[in-house]
Image (cartoon, rainbow, N blue to C red):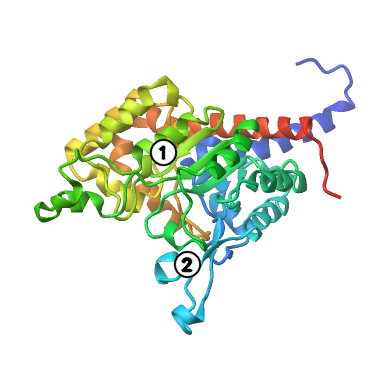
Amino acid sequence: MCITNPLAVPALLLAMLFAAKNAVAQDPAECLYNDAHFHIQDFKADGPHIADILKMMDNHVCRSTLMSLAVTVAHDPLIDSDFAPSYYTQTDGQALYYNAIQDVLVAHKFLALPERDRARTDPLMSAFNLKDARAGDYIKKMVYLYPNVWSGFGEIHFKKQEFSEKIAGGPPSLYSTSIDAIFDVIGEMGAVAVVHCDRDTPGNLALRNDPGARVFFNDETSRPQYLDPFKAFLKRHPNVTVIWAHFMGNGRGVQPYPEHWKYLDAMLADPVFKHVNIDISWGPVIAPYFLDTPEHLKMTTDLIRKYPDRFLYGSDKGATADWQLVSKSYEVWGPLWTELGPVLTRQVARDNYIRIFNESRKNIRGWEKAHPDPIE
């Protein structure tokens, strides 16, 4: 480097020192992972201060999604009396409703960050009504209202245990043209969407394995109830980079069939689904299904080795800035990280996130420039 103006040296050195300081604060060598599945608010639209979340991330998490929860759980005294539920399993009522304040809070918290910290986070939008064919207009209005904020969409819940049936007015449907209209808009923006769709009805596999209950299935071949309908939906939206959460739709009561690894392999091998990725979030719930035996661990590891660019890590922790709690979601996958080795672990836990969310962020900024419509 040749400097012709000696007076420029102090300013140049200061700039270099400032850049070095920022680089150290976000040095990937000092973090474990990027988090593709992190909720900053709970089902009451409450959560910790964003500054506390960023402090937790220091030296642990390089970048993280900032997701709300699309719905808020209501307190209906006619159902629950004085008990005010804070989680969807704590009530029998249809007490979940789409609540725009969830997205407003995500944007507000992001904008409260100093400029240098904003690059470490990826705010995702989710609080649009999946049963409303005009929800695409909501999405556009939120983008206009908060320009240069959004990096994508999620977590978008299609089918989820008893969660879906508790949404006010009934559950979203995989067969609804409303969902297609929404994803047409997301695809127009070239954005990523983190989606939750159970492959099956909770408990269905256990029921199929019960000799006394087989009569209910008319001797049909055992296959997850929602796998094919959701794959049909995915085919209709090739312009949306999809992250299918929880190792392809597992959860409490929704466990992998013996053929699960084969189903996932077939989908990832099909060029029609080249826009579909898989996250391994919600580890404390789903990891036991995939690490419980040496055979399952090997099948899981082999699948990731075969498609190393299609898997991402996510904690699926919510409304907390407690690293001791959040870190458990990563640690539970310890046997998998050991089997994968450091190179593949880095790709799954860090590199794939950067590629996918950088592209989505860039595409949304491009859409904003091509469609200026400020709300005044």
The numbered dot on residue 117 is: none
SS type, badge 1: helix
Q: Which residue is drawn at 50% across and 68% down?
A: 95
From the top left corner, tell me how far across and down residue 246 is, in percent: 38, 44
Residue under numbered circle 1: 230
| The one of 98 and 89 positioned closer to us in this rendering | 98
Between 290 and 243, the one nearer to me in the picture: 243
Query: Where the N terminus falls, by quadrant?
Result: top right
Q: What is the residue that sits farthest to the front in this orientation? A: 218
Left or right of 25? Residue 3 is right
Residue 6 shows in the view: yes
Q: Circle 2: is it few (<14), some (14-19), or many (20+) Cα within 10 Å? A: many
Q: For the point 32% across and 47% down, which residue is it?
A: 200
Q: Quadrant of residue 309?
A: top left
Q: In this view, does 222 lie to the left or right of 191?
A: left
Q: Which residue lies furthest to the bottom in this view?
A: 82
State the residue position of label 2: 94
Q: Earlier in the sequence, mark 2 or mark 1?
A: 2
Q: Position of residue 109 (x, y in %)?
A: 67, 55
List x then y, in percent, for residue 312.
44, 36
Residue flagged by tag 2: what amino acid is it? Answer: Gln
Rendered residue at 54%/54% (across/down): 56
> Where does residue 46 sit, x and y in percent of width and height?
58, 65
Give the amino acid type for the residue marked by disc 1 in the picture.
Phe
Callout 2: SS: loop
Q: Quadrant of residue 223?
A: top left
Name the residue at 80% across, 29% down. 12
Q: Distance between the residues labelled 2 and 1?
A: 24 Å
Residue 62 in sight here:
no
- Taking the image as shown, residue 335 lies to the left or right of residue 187, namely left
